[in-house]
Image: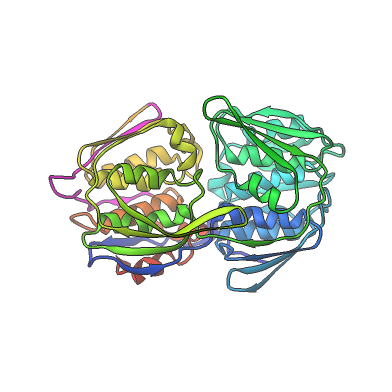
Amino acid sequence: MSSTASSTAAPMPLVARGARPLAGRVRVPGDKSISHRALILGALSVGRTTVTGLLEGEDVLATGKAMSLLGATVARTGPGAWTVDGVGVGGFAAPPETLDFGNAGTGSRLVMGAVAGCPVTAMFDGDASLRRRPMRRILDPLVKMGATVLQAAEGDRLPIMLAGARDPLPIVYATPVPSAQVKSAVLLAGLSAPGETVVIESEATRDHTEKMLLHFGATVTVVPEGAHGRRITLKGQPELHGATVVVPADPSSAAFPLVAALLVPGSDIVLETVMTNPLRTGLITTLREMGAAIEEVDAREDGGEAMADLRVRFSELSGVEVPPERAPAMIDEYPVLAVAAAFARGTTVMRGLKELRVKESDRLAATADLLRVNGVTVTLDGDDMIVEGFGGKGRPPGGGTVATHMDHRIAMSALVMGLATETPVAVDDAAFIATSFPGFVETMRGLGADIG
């Protein structure tokens, strides 16, 4: 299994221009969160796991390669179709080389959790962007469970050499910030520990790990904790069994054609088989509050995950205030929401966005810069972002060149903006889009977008 390191790709500038209304049906790539977890839990299971609809972006391919290096057999059998022959809980072998995750923050952090519960040592590394991202929040609970950090770059950043625990300890861990990655790392490490591993979160975060652990045969209970939080309890040392995983379309990827259809006059599109897990639909909730015409069609469920086709039509939007407790359900979608806010009537206030500062870029600052360079007034007040919309007085002028900072979501958000601004919008580098949405440009062109 192989992937192309995005860190070595030549810069790929692109320009998006206003064009005809968007129309048609499209299925965006498989959900990245589900894809990572399917490969990891398949590797920790006994027997064969069959995955369809896997996101074949660079981030997920890096996780698949890591599973191969740790001893699982990972094979592609067709477009989006993969099999994983696992080694069982605690069965990872010492990898013969560094686990290189490229730009994959989710993959690197979840695999750290999985390795922490096994008596092996592994070196974790990534590209320049991933090396800047903090890992201490992951390492703290893993060390409490018996893992040892043998080597780390300054500030507990990659490259990191991690020695897994020979006798993992179950812990009760209250996450210091809402983070599905921290929660998932602790639960994956807890698979090898006796007794019960408990994670307490003050704000509910995406629950794919809990759902998928159940799907593979683990015993997991979830109960409310406080006003918005949850207590997740995992019974350790289960025998996970290979499973069939159908990966729904990624709502974070669907966000880009969805917002584009809302902003380009006359548009009417259908996005097929999009995950509608309520802990991932904060963007849809917010856009509907703003007046968006988003209709769920043929709602269904597979493997514990809800999904539906989404019909999206051009809409006149109005500014709203987005509460901070909604952030975990839409943390990756704020850049494209900010673009939508630029076209809305009035002011949109997005609160509690501290987590955006430690994404692939300082995504909060990068989003504000994206808007400013295209003529939109935006204010950062601590961890809040305030956008003054153009609705009722025309469209944002556009005309800027956006610095993407090797961040795929900034690049896609800027290109969506350029489809509806007065003048085209350019990005300095769109190469990193392939980490999460391979075929993005082709998909958008298929709906009628002018990007090139």
Could you tell me which residue is drawn at 75 percent across and 51 percent down? 217
Quarter of the image that includes the N terminus: bottom right
Question: In which quadrant of the rendered view does residue 351 lie?
Answer: top left
Q: Is residue 296 above or below residue 21?
A: above
Which residues are the magenta region? Answer: 382-403
Most extreme residue toward the left, as rendered? 393
* Left or right, residue 280 beside residue 237: left
Q: Is residue 423 rendered magenta in the image?
A: no
- Marks counted in the figure total 0
Q: Depth check: 153 or 338 in front?
A: 338
User: Where in the figure is residue 5, as x and y percent of width and height?
Assistant: 58, 60
Most extreme residue toward the right, as rendered? 167
* Left or right, residue 324 beside residue 55: left
Most extreme residue toward the bottom, as rendered? 78
* Left or right, residue 273 beside residue 38: left
User: Where in the figure is residue 174, as x and y percent of width and height?
Assistant: 64, 27
Q: Is residue 143 above or below residue 253?
A: above
* Left or right, residue 268 beside residue 276: left
Question: In which quadrant of the rendered view does residue 179 lie?
Answer: top right
Quarter of the image that includes the C terminus: bottom left
Q: Depth check: 341 or 320 in front?
A: 320
Could you tell me which residue is drawn at 48 percent across and 52 percent down? 276
Q: Is residue 385 rendered magenta in the image?
A: yes
Could you tell me which residue is drawn at 75 percent across and 41 percent down? 189
User: Where in the figure is residue 130, as x and y percent of width and height?
Assistant: 56, 46
